[in-house]
Image (spheres, grey):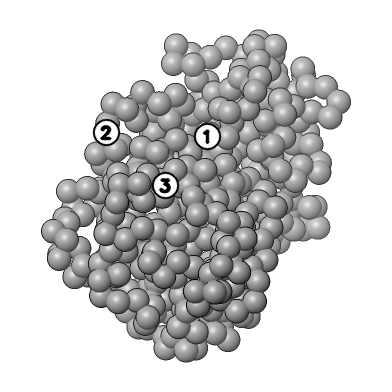
């Protein structure tokens, strides 16, 4: 694959504005704190400085523990530095994984630093360009092609060979394909996170909507789904919403994505990234369906955080990512269920992405530390996989996914089938720019400033402008 010179990243990343991947709309996805909390690091700056370990300046820590300037966090030179973007509902589970890993006396312990989600990739790319990247990081599978193309991450095959690790026995082939470029492995798969359907069982009972023997909704068509929405809408009161959904951003886009592929939509761009192959007619039809959810009054205006809105008990349905499960089940008084995104059209498809664990380029990291970093990367997914499943994510490691412990976890097995219907983005180094343009284009439809045909024309143009 053609690689850009790393030094070019500095100006490129400073200019790039990255939209949220699975953490958009205040959902808390792909966010989290750490066992070596950033707040603790900030408090320890004076002591670390005395030992010559503190970075320049003072760490600027937010209330949620995220750090605005990770380069200023005092780091322990005896630990690997892990940059995390988990600062929401799934963060505490990554905390536990790192705590457990360190307690097992590994080759080298890990210190984790939380970054603000919106800034994560820009800061990662900038830090690597400056030769100051972390030892380990996180990347969405949809972002990984760009990081590989730009030389931000390095392959790990030789270290896996040294450690005697055969990933083919641990992961499904499609998971390995998502992290393999030109025959080399650049990341360890961690999970699949999909957009699924959550529902408030108390409201469904009030509306007279029955669940099947598995505690799920029987939905096999758009008409059946709309009939259920109408029943629930009839019992909603002031300040409530049949569906908890934001009025712009990632989540309506994800519903559009699922609907487009359920309608039989073709891939948005060709495999080689040189041609737009999206079916405009189906894209418009999918956009019309999503717009109908707003136009028919199923979605209240002004919902900024749809997960919290659902947690408050004010909505019958929540269209959200699997990462919300861990937080929802801890919400006092909330009775809910979860299932894969329903099949409304021809194909049972849903939006999905994956988290992967990456080895950023770091010229100061020794060979011994790099090998230890790869040990940690594998351990997070393998030994920490069951803990990570507690967040609601669908683990990538086959042993974890097939374990009885996972199958016995409430809710998770209810939507495990989303793995079979997940449609992930193609491996395109320009996908994040494409996604930003697609979301902006569709937002004009949700806001009523453009019709569906105009919005999709703009979306098509955004795809074209980001071709190879």
* Residue at x 52%, y 27% (from the top left corner): 338
Alpha carbons under labels 3 and 1: distance apart: 18 Å
**Label 2 element class:** loop
Instruction: Report how many numbered discs are placed on residues in the image.
Output: 3
Residue 370 visible, this angle: yes
* Residue at x 71%, y 25% (from the top left corner): 313
- Say if 120 sits above or below 466 in the image: above
Instruction: Determine which residue is flagged by label 3.
Output: 99
Disc marking residue 326:
1
Residue 285 visible, this angle: no
Residue 100 falls left or right of residue 9: left
Figure quadrant of residue 225 = top right
Alpha carbons under labels 3 and 2: distance apart: 24 Å
Contact between labelled residues 1 and 3, with CB atoms less than 8 Å apart: no
Q: Pointer 1: residues within 10 angstroms few (<14), some, or many (20+)?
A: many
Figure quadrant of residue 197 = top right
Q: Quadrant of the N terminus?
A: bottom left
Horizontal and vertical percent position of residue 252? 64, 47
Residue 420 falls left or right of residue 195: left
- Nearer the observer, disc 2 or disc 1? 1
Which mark is first along the chain, 1 or 2? 1
**Label 3 element class:** helix
Which mark is first along the chain, 1 or 3? 3
């Amino acid at each position: 694959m053609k690689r850009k010179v790393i030094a070019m990243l500095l100006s490129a990343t400073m200019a790039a504005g990255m939209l949220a991947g699975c953490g958009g709309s205040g959902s808390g996805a792909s966010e989290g704190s750490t066992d070596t909390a950033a707040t603790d690091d900030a408090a320890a700056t004076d002591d670390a400085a005395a030992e010559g370990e503190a970075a320049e300046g003072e760490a600027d820590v937010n209330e949620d523990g995220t750090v605005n300037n990770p380069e200023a966090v005092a780091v322990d030179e005896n630990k690997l530095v892990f940059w995390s973007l988990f600062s929401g509902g799934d963060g505490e589970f990554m905390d536990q994984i790192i705590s457990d890993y360190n307690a097992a006396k590994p080759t080298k312990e890990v210190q984790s630093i939380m970054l603000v989600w919106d800034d994560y990739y820009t800061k990662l790319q900038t830090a690597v360009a400056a030769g100051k990247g972390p030892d380990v990081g996180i990347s969405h599978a949809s972002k990984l092609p760009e990081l590989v193309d730009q030389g931000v991450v390095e392959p790990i095959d030789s270290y896996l060979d040294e450690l005697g690790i055969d990933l083919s026995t641990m992961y499904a082939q499609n998971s390995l394909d998502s992290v393999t470029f030109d025959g080399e492995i650049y990341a360890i798969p961690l999970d699949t996170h999909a957009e699924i359907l959550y529902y408030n069982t108390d409201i469904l009972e009030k509306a007279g909507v029955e669940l099947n023997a598995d505690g799920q909704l029987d939905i096999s068509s758009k008409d059946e789904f709309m009939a259920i929405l109408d029943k629930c809408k009839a019992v909603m009161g002031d300040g409530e919403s049949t569906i908890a959904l934001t009025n712009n951003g990632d989540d309506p886009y994800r519903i559009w994505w699922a609907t487009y592929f359920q309608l039989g939509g073709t891939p948005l761009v060709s495999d080689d990234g040189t041609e737009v192959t999206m079916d405009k007619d189906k894209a418009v039809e999918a956009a019309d369906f999503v717009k109908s959810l707003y136009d028919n009054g199923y979605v209240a205006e002004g919902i900024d955080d749809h997960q919290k809105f659902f947690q408050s008990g004010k909505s019958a349905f929540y269209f959200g990512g699997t990462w919300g499960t861990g937080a929802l089940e801890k919400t006092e008084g909330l009775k809910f269920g979860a299932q894969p995104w329903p099949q409304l059209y021809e194909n049972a498809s849903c939006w999905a992405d994956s988290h992967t664990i990456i080895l950023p380029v770091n010229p100061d990291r020794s060979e011994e530390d790099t090998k230890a970093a790869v040990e940690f990367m594998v351990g997070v997914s393998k030994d920490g996989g069951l803990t990570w499943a507690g967040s609601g994510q669908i683990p990538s490691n086959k042993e974890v996914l097939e374990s009885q412990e996972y199958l016995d976890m409430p809710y998770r097995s209810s939507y495990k089938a989303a793995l079979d219907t997940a449609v992930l983005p193609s491996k395109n180094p320009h996908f994040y720019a494409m996604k930003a343009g697609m979301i902006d284009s569709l937002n004009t439809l949700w806001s009523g400033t453009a019709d569906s045909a105009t919005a999709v024309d703009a979306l098509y143009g955004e795809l074209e402008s980001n071709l190879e």
